[in-house]
Amino acid sequence: MPFRAVLFDFGQTLFQAPDAAALLTEAGVEPATAQRLWAEIWARALTPEELAKGRDLSEAAHRRHWMELFAAAEPHAPGISRRLYEAVMRVESWTPFPDTPAVLAALHEGGVAVGVLSNTAMALQPVLAVHGLDRYVSACVESFRLGIEKPDPRIFAAACEALGSKPEETLLVGDSHLADGAGVLAGLTVLLLPGVPRDTPRGLEAVLDLLQIRRPAPSQATPRNLRFRGDPA
Ligand SMILES: [Mg+2]
């Protein structure tokens, strides 16, 4: 069956998380240590044990569990947990991958319904709006509002309903085999993309190929996060 709708995961699929290692360095942590600390915190955050804690079921749970994870950096920079958490929750901290805008625009122009489905404690429409991307997205489904999180099959069903699509005609695109991969249990087809370095294309054009939508022409525009010092904002 051809896909009529695409549901994207948000974090590390459409948008990249704040550069926490840079924040640690700004707080006085030596750069190599900052990189290592952040890699350890992030790796722990993605373990099945952490995901099973229900971190994204409510705003309170999200704050509690992330503050516990960030506490690993406290001996290196006292007070950093709160600053890291504030950065994670700041709308402006999240940036789209370089290929996100063109792929969302191409899907929208191709008549495909586009939704965002995220385990999060943050409203995502304002984050999309900062980058002018909300116009392409007809539904944002956030776990904390429903009190259900991926991999619970019910959240995938809720997202399809919000998008007005049937699971079998909906493609889910994500980065986590544990969270997003469970879309198959609700009848969706799932495309999982391996991680990429910061500020490099996410590989989202594979979605256009699957839906047989023409890839956009290469843009001459400089991505927001690759501007040089002195360029106009
Ligand atoms: Mg993700």
Image (cartoon, rainbow, N blue to C red):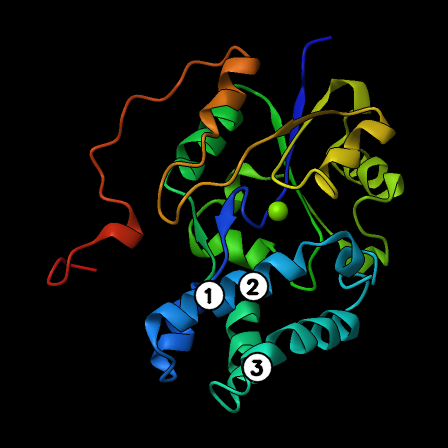
Mark closest to the chain's N terminus, 3 or 1: 1
Name the amino acid type tagged 1.
Arg
Task: Give the label on residue 36, or none.
Answer: 1
Mark closest to the chain's N terminus, 3 or 2: 2
Residue 177: name its quadrant.
Answer: top right
Helix, strand or loop at label 1? It is helix
Name the amino acid type tagged 2.
Glu
As displayed, is residue 170 above or below residue 147? above
Alpha-carbon neighbours of circle 3 within 10 Å: few (<14), some, or many (≥20)?
A: many
- Do the residues bearing badges 1 and 2 touch, measured as CB atoms within 8 Å? yes
Closer to us: mark 3 or mark 1? 1
On the image, numbered disc 3 is attached to which residue? 81
Helix, strand or loop at label 2? It is helix
As displayed, is residue 167 above or below residue 182? above
- Residue at x-position 80% and y-position 38%: 156
Closer to us: mark 3 or mark 2? 2
As displayed, is residue 63 above or below residue 171? below
Task: Give the label on residue 40, or none.
Answer: 2
- Residue at x-position 79% and y-position 58%: 49
